Image (tube, rainbow, N blue to C red):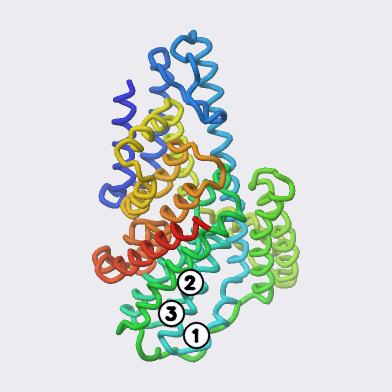
Amino acid sequence: METLIIIIFILGYLAITLEHNLKLDKLIPALGMMAILWALVAFGIEDFTNWFDSSAHALVEGFSGFGMDEKHHLLEETLLHHLGKTAEILFFLLGAMTIVEIIDYFDGFATFKNYIKTKKKKKLLWIFASLAFILSAIIDNLTATIVLITILQKIIKDKETRLWFAGLIVISANAGGAWSPIGDVTTTMLWIGKKVTTVKLIEYLIIPSLLCVIVPVLIASFLKPFKGSLDIVEGEISGSKSKYGATMLYLGLTAIIFVPIFKTVTHLPPYVGMMLSLSVVGIFAEIYSRSQFSISHPIDIEGDNSEGFHSPVHKSLSKIEMPSVLFFFGILMAVAALESLGMLFIGAEHLKTIIPNTDVVIMLLGVGSAVVDNVPLVAASMGMFQEPIDSHLWHFVAYSAGTGGSMLIIGSAAGVVAMGMERINFFWYFKNIAWLAAIGFVVGAVAFMFLRNF
């Protein structure tokens, strides 16, 4: 039965990796794989000899001698445990996504256009790289990429030039997301899974992540595509269309930054703080909407505002990327099935025997995240390694998984969305951007290994 479970997982993983070739959204194989794996676990529970207790981070002693009722009871408890841990991540992401959509509802991100005052390509590159690095640490790398490429499309007319800028934005956004507990799905997983704390994550990864951006951007600034000036059409760079845009931007970003502080003070799971932040942002959004859309100026959005008012919270919730949320659910619960059978724990022991150097293993994880999705890789590493909270291993996992995906356009959510928005060719990115990302990744990794000794 164990062999069949591994085969199903590999097939599901391949289907996720080849989603573009199969023309099948990755959430479908993720959900199917999850359901089938847990069904096989339930059917074969009589014959399994190992069971992993996630709360104790150890194999259950004497599991093979348990009776059927005991094994099924343990299965139900384990399934409920993993569902709860996965739900913590999903509700956190839902809250963050909703706040971002509320900011966008008021056109708040257009405020960033005011920072762009230059026509020089080199200077513009540093501005966009800096914005991507900072913004991705607050609103996540995926959203930061979408926001900045949208602005990019408004101010740069030449397609080839935009592709170069988009490539460096992907590198910067992924590096910016690696050092923040809310900057990337994988770092959020490690943070909520109590593998890292906010302070230590920032302390150990801020410099490696900065170097991961600065070195590629510095090299790129001497390349031909970033020499000279742009022809920017007058009037292209303008502020937010809504008078409340800037206010909602700063309020929303502050609310998201407040979440780690709330967790530190109350010791409650992060999703509780995110729900509080969402409620505060929602209150102001509703108040500002009533001011903006009065009865004397009625607008009818989707036919449900009889009094000329449409709830920005409802509108924002309707725009959330639910396929991504369901994909995370499917893949995290599928990996949990392998973890529950002790496969990841035993696999880690064998891996440590084959490759004694853990740094090499984690760097390979970073390279692997450029080829396959980094979410299951990090989920697997959380089941494989049993190091305590804030171990250097977890910080290195966060860095490698977060920045390694930049080496291929399909290696990160930021890369995939940039690929879709700008129609970036896989081989164009591989030829022109991948080497810059690889240099940044290696420099940052070396810096981390040096700094952790202090």
Distance CA(mark 1)–CA(mark 3)? 18 Å
Q: What residue type is labelled 2?
A: Leu
Distance CA(mark 3)–CA(mark 2)? 12 Å
Tell whether 320 sits left or right of 45. Answer: right
Which residue was labeled with disc 2? 148
Which of 257 and 302 lies nearest the eye of the viewer?
257
Q: What residue type is labelled 1?
A: Glu
Mark 2 neighbour class, 10 Å CA radius: few under 14, some 14 to 19, many 20 or more = many
Query: Please, is residue 163 above or below residue 41 in the view?
Result: below
Task: Name the mark on residue 236.
Answer: 1
- What residue sits 35% from the left and 56% below the top? 411
Element assignment for label 2: helix
Q: Which of marks 1 and 3 is nearer the N terminus?
A: 3
Mark 1 neighbour class, 10 Å CA radius: few under 14, some 14 to 19, many 20 or more = few
Query: Please, is residue 68 above or below residue 313 in the view?
Result: above
- What residue sits 65% from the left and 67% below the top? 299
Mark 3 neighbour class, 10 Å CA radius: few under 14, some 14 to 19, many 20 or more = many
Query: Please, is residue 7 above or below residue 378 in the view?
Result: above
Q: Residue 227 occupies which quadrant of the picture? A: bottom left
On the image, the x and y values in percent for residue 304 come to 64, 56
Element assignment for label 1: loop
Asked if marks 1 and 2 touch (Cβ < 8 Å), the reply is no
Which residue was labeled with disc 3? 125
- What residue sits 56% from the left and 23% below the top? 77
Q: Which of marks 1 and 2 is nearer the N terminus?
A: 2
Q: Which residue lies furthest to the front in this view?
A: 454
